[in-house]
Each structure stands twice: as C-alpha cells, then as structure tokens.
Amino acid sequence: MEESQLIKLSKQGDGNSFNQLVEKYQKLAYNLAYRFMGQAQAAEDATQEAFLSAWKGLGSFRGENFKAWLLQIVANTCRDYLRANRRHPTTSYEDLLVDPSPTLVTNEKSLELEESLQRGLAQLPHEQRLAIILSDAIGMSYEEIAQTMGCNLGTVRSRLSRGRESLRNWLLAHGELLGR
Amino acid sequence: MFGFLRQQNEKWVKERLSLYLDGRLDVGQRAKVESHLKDCLVCRDELASLQATVEALKKLPLVETPRSFVMPALKLSPRPVTFYRLRMATVAVSVLLVAVIAGDSLGMFFRPEALKPVMAPAPAAMPAPPPPAASMAESPTAAPTAVPAPASQPAPVPRFAPTPVPATAPQAAEAVPRLAPAPLPTPTPGIGAFQMQQAPSSLPAPLPVPPSAGKDTTSGDTGANAATSAPGLTPAEIPPVGSAGKAGTRAFSGADDKAAPPAPQPSPVPGGQSQAEILQPTSEPPTPSQTPSQTPEYLWPVRQFEIALVAFILILISVTTYFWLRGKKE
C-alpha cells in the first residue's frame, strides 16, 4: 500500500496502517534520536514518545512529506528531553556520550572515531547538530532538512556550514580527526 | 590593498567550502572557489579537514533499533479522532449558543411587525387639534402658559382627575393642561403671569389671566401661577388667602422640579362650566408611557433552542470527559 494511502487510513483512526508507517520509519527516527542525544536508552524513549505524539497529532498533518514531519516530531521530542534532562540531570552528559553503537564492536578505530564525532556533535548548538545529523548521518537533502527544521534553504546552508566548521575545529583541537 | 582583497576573497571561499563539498554552488561560484583553491594553501587545507569530517559523519552507520516501535492495539484505539471530534463539536455548539444568545439580546429574532406598536406609539396618542374656544384649557399648546413644563414631559392628557395626595413628577406634568386658564378676560397680566407666559417660546400670543390671578401677582408673589394652575380642587381644599402665595410659590417651584403639587385655588371658567365638571375623570386613550408593553414575538422558538443547546453542550462535555478519562486510564 502506498504511503499516502497509509497516512489517509491512519488519519481515519486505522492503527494498523499507522503501524506500517512506524515500521517504515522507525530506524530513521531512532537513529536521529540516537545521534542527537547520544544515549541508546534516551533515544529509545524519545522515539517511542515521538511516535505516540505523531499518532495523536496525525489529524493536524497537512504536508506532503511525512518523513520530514515525523522527523521534526522526533527532533522536538529529543530537544524537550535534553532540556528536561538539563534541568533535572539524572546522568552526566559524559555518560550520555559514551554509549557505543551496537554495530561498532569489531573495529576499534571506527569506535573511537564514532565516539569522537558523538562528543563533537554534543558540543554544537541544537540547530547545527540537527542539521549535520540530518544531512550527513541520515542523508537528507537540503530541501528535506528545511522542511524538517521548519526554516528556509539559506538557514540550512548557514547552519550546516557553521556546524561542520565547528565540529571540524573541535576534532582538530582534540586530535581526533582521523584519516587526514 | 592587495592583501585586504585577498583576505576578503579567502573569507568568501571558506564560507562556501561546505556548499562546495555538497555540490550546491552554481557554476560561477564553483569556478571562483576552484580558482582560489589552486593558489591558496590555507583554503586547501581547510577543505581537506572539512571533507574528512563530512566523510567521517557519512560513515556513521545507521544503528539498528533495539526493539520494534510498533505500538500495541491499546494505544491505537480510535480515541484521538473521537476525542478530537468531540472537542470540536463542543466548541462549535458553544459558539452557536453564544451567537444565539447575542442575537436574542440584540432583538434579532423578533417579528418585525411585533416591534411596530412599541416603536411608534406617539402619533396615535397625540391629541386631536383643540377646538377653538372652550377647549383651549385642554389644549396641549396652552399648557405651558401657566407653568413652565419641563421639556421631557410626556404628551398631556386633556382631562384628568386631580388627586389631593402629593404629586409625583408625572402627576405634576399631567396637571399642566388643567392649569391653563382658557380665555380669561383680564388683559393686564401680573408680573408672574407675564413671566410664565413668556416662558414657552411656542406660544403664539400671551393668554389673558383672570383677575384673581392678577391680584395675586400684584401682591408680589408668583402665586398667580399656582392660583391659576390648580383649578380642579374643591373649595374645601383651598388654602387660606394669606398662605396662597407661599403655596403658590411652592407649587411653582414644585412644578419646576416635578415634585410638589400645584396650589389649589378655583378660577372661573367661561361658558358657565365649573372646573370640577371639566376635570371629571374621562376615559382617555393612554399616553405612550402608559401603553402596556407588548411582549414581542420571536420568529422561531429561540428560548427552547437555547435550552436545547445548553443541554447538548452538557452532554458533549460529559462524553468528552468520559473519553478523556478512559484514554488517560489506558
């Protein structure tokens, strides 16, 4: 069944259709949450909460790009989670960043680089971090990023350029930019 | 100068390195960047480090989800749609109720013909043009000759039974027609009478004042006004002559502030008709102020509709609350 049909049925209250959309986008949503927050458990909670929010707010979906709309909800949920965690920290931010990806268990060098990138991303402002993750880690186009972030293309270019530069400088400063 | 331009160019290129990597520059900008990169070692270095960063980011693997985020059937009950529609319905009916109440209070639902008697009663209650001679005393135009009636007085009633009780404002106003002494023979009015005749500007000519009134006025009192203004009382109710001036003064001032009754004193009436006869109670058409207010008819049963809307809103709120509590429990 096509995505538009699934969305239409979901808006009419069909939970099975919405679950098909969940299956289609859950990996993307979880990866965004994981890269944005840096901790597996927090990303899992945020992803589940985001899907629930999407189900509740599906009636207000008027756009054409369901993926951008869904990832915007995920990003907002992650931001709210981080803000709440900053006000009431239960774990240190360093703890949030040393959670290794389950797939990187064999390559020690790749694991180090991933941890370095994750630490570097954590230093960036939310908007720059989100732009970099959407562009480079998830592979979205500038147009999709603009839809997801709710801004224009110029803002996307600016955030992406400044974010990459800041991340590059951070990695260079910590001697962790490998492969040069 | 050359160094400044080179710095500006280098800054311009550095700002576009990220876009250059993504291939988001147009042909001209791309050529300019590439031209600069050939000559600038610093910018080439920047580009290499930036490219390494982006490549490292792109090499980040997509992490497998720790579990499926497919939601169980309980969470996917049709509650959101039902709840949303119920809320919208409640809001819509509430807005409708407010609109109906507002329209009702503004009188938008009355029958147009039901408003006519209320809106234009005055012409029907206007007295007919007075007969020439004896009815001058009853004419509304003659009324202000004796007492300067306030402008806000209602249309006068030609004949009205006097009451000995202290008059209220309407009663004082209604006494005005009685006070007009019709064709009285005395051509030399007293000062008080003259002043009273000058007061209404609509009077065509000063009316004559009876001799008794002239006497009273010559006594230096405005009692002439009162003396001629209360002809309807019986002689037993007439106060002593010595007190007539004071009573008349009180009556005059009372007529001004619409509170005190006019001083009783009989005055001659032409045609051999006593004032008591003239002022007999008659069945006169009510003045507009006395017209019983009619309850306007509605175009449709507005009250019943409002009650039904309130009941419907209460039902909607109850059902919405039920769904909300059920969803919260789930």
Image (cartoon, coloured by chain):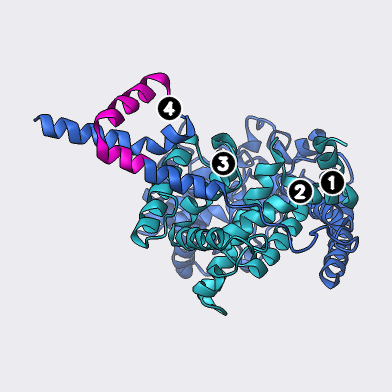
Chain colours: A cyan, B blue
Give amino acid for label 3: Ile
- Secondary structure at badge 3 equals helix
Query: Residue beneath label 2, please?
Result: A58
Query: Residue beneath label 3, please?
Result: A145
Position of B268 compared to A26: left or right? left
Query: Residue beneath label 4, please?
Result: B25
Give amino acid for label 2: Leu
Is residue B189 among what the camera can see?
Answer: no
Of the residues under marks 2 and 1, which one precedes in the sequence?
1
- Secondary structure at badge 1 equals helix
Region of the chain picked out in magenta, as a range: B25-47
Q: Is residue B291 above or below residue B323?
A: above
Give amino acid for label 4: Leu
Is B29 in the magenta? Answer: yes
Q: State how far apart marks 2 and 3 are (Cα).
A: 20 Å
- Secondary structure at badge 4 equals loop
* Disc marking residue B246: none
Q: Main secondary structure of the magenta part?
A: helix
